[in-house]
Structures are given as structure tokens and as C-alpha cells.
Image (cartoon, coloured by chain):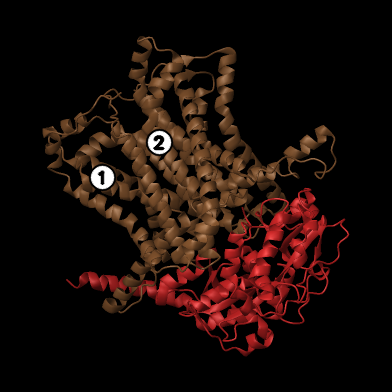
Chain colours: A brown, B red
Amino acid sequence: MTLANSPDGIQSRHLRARGGAWIVASCVIAGLVLLPVLALLWQAMRGSDGLWSHLAANVLPHAITQTAILLAGVGLLVAVIGTLSAWLVTAYDFPGRRMLEWALLLPLAVPTYIVAYAYLDLLHPLGPVQGVIRAILGYDSPRDFRLPDIRSMTGAILLLSLVLYPYVYLPTRAMFLTQAASLVEVSRALGTTRAQVFHRVALPLARPAIAVGMSLALMETLNDIGASEFLGVRSLTIAVYTTWVTRYDLPGAAQIALAMLALVIALVSLERWARRRQRFSTSAQRGRSFAPRVLTGRAAGFALGLGLLPVVLGFLIPASYLAVEAWERFRLAGFSAGLVTEARNTFLLSAIATAAVVACGVVVSYGARARPGRLSAAALRVASMGYAMPGTVLALGILTVVAGLDRWIDATARDWLGVSTGLVLIGSGMALGYAYLARFLAISTGSVEAGFSRIPRSYDHAARTLGRGPGETLWQVHLPLSRGAMAAAGLLVFVDCMKELSATLLLRPLNFETLATRIYAEAARGTYENAAYAALAIVLVGLLPVILLARIGRMGQKP
Amino acid sequence: MAYPIHLARAVLAGVTLCAGAASAQELNLYTSREPGLVEPLLQAFTESTGIAVNTVFLKDGIAERVEAEGAASPADVLMAVDVGNLADLVDKGLTQPVDSEVLTTAIPENLRDPDNHWFALSMRARVVYADADMDLDAITYEELADPKWQGKLCIRSGQHPYNTGLFSAYLAHHGAEATEAWLDGIKANLARQAGGSDRDGAKDILGGICDIAVANSYYVGLMRTGAGGEEQKAWGEAIKVILPTFEDGGTHVNISGAAVAKNAPNRDEAVQLLEFLVSDEAQQIYARANFEHPVKPGTALDPVVESFGPLTPDTIPLTQIVTHRAEASRLVDKVGFDN
């Protein structure tokens, strides 16, 4: 597996000869992501008296411990669930496997705060689960018997992992499908047992995919506020939020958030550094899945049950809960009038933003490939920064940039044309598109980069030798060959845009609601039951790209 | 050469014309109050004046957004819950004074800004929910730290504005040292980790997790009327409401209120909205639909709220309580209230 591919040498120099435009475009996109971070840096420099002594004495010891336990727990669990489920549906064949391949993605459609709320209600002493247990055991009142509270670190780790494991499952399965085939077959021919194939071949091979997926899941975890608050985890992000909202100390909040960003960048760099000696061979044979072992009888039943477990816990239970709640709401208060508009807003906004985010991800990733070098590599890294910060804080940075630009446009229009434009970017919702780009570009560059890395460099060389420019090469070679990776990027970005709350809440125009802001508006006043429709709708809208991806993925498998 | 500029000017003029034609009839509201609570009031306002209200619900970032938008901000009225948030808007220079006899007559002096920047529109009390079967008729805030409640008290996060408001009032009454000891005592009494919503207090009392809970008064009305579903009626019936007092004062109340934005493009309409919100009609909506305490003296309470008994608001002015907010928040961290 350490077959070195040799991108250097004469051929690469030939490649470098063109493609300057890609570098410029990459840098512009990276600059767009960097601007809000710089705005926050400027905020942070305004200073905050006595913040760090207070934090060091009273907040950080607890918050860092809690954050570390949470990240370790979620990281471990998503890696295990994601990798095992990916292996299960690629290495084995059993009735229901094809359904599982896409069903395992379904929990993606459930926002963390919704899964947390659903389980809190279901497992509450007054909820159905404990009610049944009491009835069986013969207790009348919850005062006589109740289960431990789900509002705990264990509860948080379990619930977050149940909806975040698809971040690992998706790239890891792709890696198994496209890369493992020949190597696994060779290993078997050399007499390696099945268990050893997984440990010694498939797992190390999938490491970059697992690392990418885990880092996405962990950043979601790190920046989560809603679920952590419900479940009583006092993470660093909660400390950032408290500093800003309760103590009106935005510079202080920006300082903590930037410190966290620095830490995340350090950790990501460390992981890359640890993998620096590994080169992953790029097989010219593409998309050939290795022959899975056919399971029958009890083994098949067991495999299906195992694969269904995360789907049931991470999707079916919370979704059914929402369906029941929405039905109750319908009987009580009728259909919510704004729902259709909110669903349409959510879908259109997410779809447009996703197209932009994936396109920018392609540009940045391809820039780094067409013109390898420090500048393009730096652009690639910078483009991923927005995802590593708490969304609330990044949204404030984006607000500064967008509003500044809006004021400049307005002032310029007044000077030159004698008319006021008002706030064009915020007023038109373009600010939201920018916010999603800055926040989620990491997801699309991550997936697209992984997709490109599976295309042998010799293809680039061949195309260029045949006289194709970098743009034509991208269009005719890379894009068709990495269709699956781009679809995956699109799916992840879409569901994240759809669930995004902090920036949407802060930057949306007047009279504009999405499903997420509707849910939040109800949750903020504690009337969760009113949010049941919107919560169910968000899950349903999230299903669309999952189904779409499943279809594209299946097409990609056909030779 | 000049063609693009002419074109741009024509387009912009068209856009501005449309916006201008509409703006005579409308007003832009930035609110950190939840839309569900505000909408009935706005509907009544539009019906009575013909002025349409465009709304954006912003929660925490309202000050940052208006500040960033600067002179071009379309915001006319800024609406917020918690006196601290209103004071923050004034401190950042985002509001303008309103000289209105309607407002100053309707709203008692202690419920508006001395310089007429913000005005309270409704009040809510921070009360105690107790198990309906319990033999308890009165309690002081100080007694919440009494060890006899050990393992029996539920409360939401200490960093929530409703709680930092109460803790700031405690600071104003008793000073930092006593407040820290009191918070330690409450922390020791918690039946579960501080968290969830105010309504969870009632739910957890029925669920057998705790005996008493600290929460806002209006949730009881929402629960008991079954507005949120049948099951919530049971939560509401499982508890009784006790209006606690400070040993040397009254019940802690907080407010929802509004201010006119500094750069309000529709200033007249903005003032009209504020004046409408203290009219008898609007104050009735606050009382009946939201189960809050109206600010206008003489407005009838909802029967559910009236059943709690007479409310004696604490005597320390809200503007003084606000000054302790950051300190209260730091003390919450210091005693590890939420951990």
C-alpha cells in the first residue's frame, strides 16, 4: 500500500506550466473564507478585561475536560460505527444489503438538536419507554421507579454519534468500494484470513477516509450548542456563547473561538503529519467492487440486524417520534400555514448554496492538483477553516464583512448615482449563501480532494499531452471520474446548509424563515410541540439528497 | 461609456421607487422575542393602523446586526426580552429617545428608561413551581439554598438570562459573598444538572425528579390551558405556583420591551407601534395570550395568572439590577452551577 506515485519530475513541471488562473481562483475563494476570521481577529484584539484569568480559574478546567471526553467518545464511536457498517455492506452480501447501503445515510437528515430532544422526551420518566417499564414492573408512579437521566455525558456521546457516524460511513465505503478490491483479492490469494484482511489491509487503506469523516463529525460535535445544552454538557462552545451573550463580551468570545480554531488546525496538521510517509496508490482500475462474501441463514439475519441498528436508533426512532408529534399537533391546531413557504425557502437556499459550495470546492481542490505548490496547498487549508469554528461566532465575523460591504455599496451608489441601494447582500439573502460557503467549504474540499486523489496522475499527464488545458482536463477527466465524490460532497453540504442555524438566524432578510429558524423560534420559548411539523419537514427535505445520492452511487457502480 | 451607469441608475431608481412606495405603509421590526409571542400583537397593530410590519427574529445577535448595518439599517423598532438586553442596545448607541406622552403615561416610571430610550411592555415574575400536593404556601429566594431542599430542586442553566437576571437581583440585595454562598447552596440542592427549559421544571416535578422548580410565571398559563397539547395540562395541574420574595423585598420580575432604532427610516410608524403596544387592546393580548403581567396599571390579568395571588414586584430598580449581570454570570461559572 505504500506504492509511491511520483508526481514530481519532468511531467509535473509540464503540468505546472499552465493553470495560473486556478491558483488565482483558489486564492480568491480562500480569501472569502479568511475574511470573517480576520474580522473576528480584529474583534478579539479589542481586548477583554480579566477574561482569561476568570476562564482559567472557573471555566476551562471543566470545559476542556468535558470537551475532550465528548470528542474522544464521539470520535471513537463514529469511527467504529461508520467503518464497521461500511465494511459490512461492502465485504458481505445478504438480503437487504442494497437497502442498507443508502439507509445507513439517513441519520444525516436528523439535526443533533432534534435527536437530542426526541430522546429526552421518549426516555423521560413521563415518556412511553419508562411508562412501559413501570407497567411491567408494577409501579404506579415515577416517584417509585425511574431510569437514570439521559441528560449526561454518556447520553450526549451516544446521541451525537448516532447521527454523525454517516460522515465516516460515506467516505469509508467509497474507499472500500474503489480501492480495496484488488488489494483484498491479492491478500486473500496470499492466504490472509478474512479477519486479517480487515485489520491489515482494509482498515489501514481506509485511514484517510476515516480521518476525513471523523474530523467532520468532530467539528460538528465541537461546535454543537443545541444538543449539548439539552444534554447538559458544558463544552468550550457553551463557554464562548456564555461569554458573548450573558456577559456581552464579544471580544472575549472571539478570543476563545480563535484559540479553539488554532487548536483544531494544530490537531488536523498533526494527523496529516502522522500520515506524511504514507502514499496511497491510485489504482487505474476504477469502481470495481470486490466480490463480497454471500451470507445466508442466521448469519445473514445477524448482518442485517447489525446494519439496521444505527438506522433504527439514529433515524427511524426520532423520525417516528416526530411523525407522531406532528400528527398530534395537526389534530390540535390544524396545518401550519407557513410550513410550505419555510420548506421551499430551506430547499432552494440549500440547493443554491450547495451548488456554489461544491463548485468552489472543485476549484480549490483542482487548483492544488493542477498547480501543486505551497500557495495552492495553503489555499486548500485556509478554505477549510470556517468549519472549525463555532457557527455562532463565525456568523458574527461574516456579519461584519457582509454588512461592511453592504454599507460600502450603499455609500458608493449614493455618491455616484445619487440613490441608496439599502443593504443589498443582507436584504437579498446573498449573505446567507456567503455564510454557508465560508462555513461548509471544508466539507466539499474534503470530499472532492479525496475523489481526485483516486484518479491517477498519469491521467492528467495523458490529457495534457493530448493538448487539453487544465480546464478541459477537469471537465473531461476529473469531473466524470469523481462524480460519486462530488455527489457525496453535495449531500453532506446540502444537509448541513439545511440544518444550519446560527448564521441563518443572524443574517437572513426580513420576513424570511427557514425550517431551522422556525424550529428554533419555537424551541426558544419552550413550545417544542409547535416545532414538530418543521422538524419532520427538515428530516423529509434532508431525505431528498440522500435518495438522490443513493441513485448516483448505484449508477457509479455499474461498469 | 456612461451607459452602464445610466442603466444602473435607472434600475436602482426603479427598485427604490417600489421600496419607497411601500415604505409609507410599513415598518421593520427586529425582535429577539419569539415570533409566536409577538405575532398576535402585530396582527392587531396592522388591523388597527394599516401599517404592515416586516419582522426578523434575531435572538442573540440583534445588537451586533444593527451595529454592523450602521446608518443603512432598515430596523425601525428593536424588541427584546430582559432588561439587560435592552440596556445593552442603549449602551451601544443603537437607539434613540422617544418623547411620547402616551408611553410615559401608560408605563410606570420604574419600567422605562430614565432617558426614554427603552420601554417595558410586559412583565414576568421568576416564581417557584411546587408539587401540587406539597404543604408549601410561601418561600423566599434565600430559602432555595436551604439544605432541606437537597436533591429536590430543578432549575435551568444558571447562564440563561432569566436566571442571571434573578442572580443579579440577589447580588443587588445581598452582595457578592452572600450570593456566591447562596448559589453554592442551590447547586447542592439540585435534583438534576441545571438545564432544560422552564417548562421542564413542571414536567420533571410530575416525573418525580424534583419537588420544586424555579421558572417564569407565564409558562403555567400555557400549560394549564392545554395550548401546547393535552399532556401539558397534566404538567400544569401537577404544580402550584408560589410567588417567592426576597427577605427584604418583593418578587423578582423581568420585562419584555422595545426601543426605536437610532437610524429608523420609519420613525413615526415605529413610535406608533410602541404606543399601540401599551394600548388597552395590546396589553390585554399580553395578559390573555401570553399570560404575562401587563405594564399598564389597571389591565386585567388572565384568571390563571390571577390565581397565583397578588404580585409585589421587588423594589430595587431594574436599571440597577442590570449592572450586576456580568458579575452574576461569573459567579455562576465560579460555583460550577451548570457543571
Residue A55 point in image, percent of width and height: 51, 59
Location of residue B14 (image quadrant)? bottom left
Vertical relation: A394 (above or below) A104:
below
Secondary structure state at the residue bearing disc 1: helix
Observer-nearest of A480 and A129: A129
Total numbered labels placed on residues in the image: 2
Look at 47% across and 61% down and name the residue there: A52
Observer-nearest of A91 and A544: A91
Q: Amino acid at mark 2?
A: Ala
Q: Earlier in the sequence, mark 1 or mark 2?
A: 2
Q: Amino acid at mark 1?
A: Ala
Residue A255 point in image, percent of width and height: 42, 60
Vertical relation: A289 (above or below) A388:
above
Residue A193 point in image, percent of width and height: 43, 12
Residue that label 1 marks: A377
Residue B247 point in image, percent of width and height: 77, 73
Q: Which mark is residue A211?
A: 2
Look at 36% across and 33% down and name the residue there: A208
Q: Chain of mark 2?
A: A
Location of residue B138 (image quadrant)? bottom right
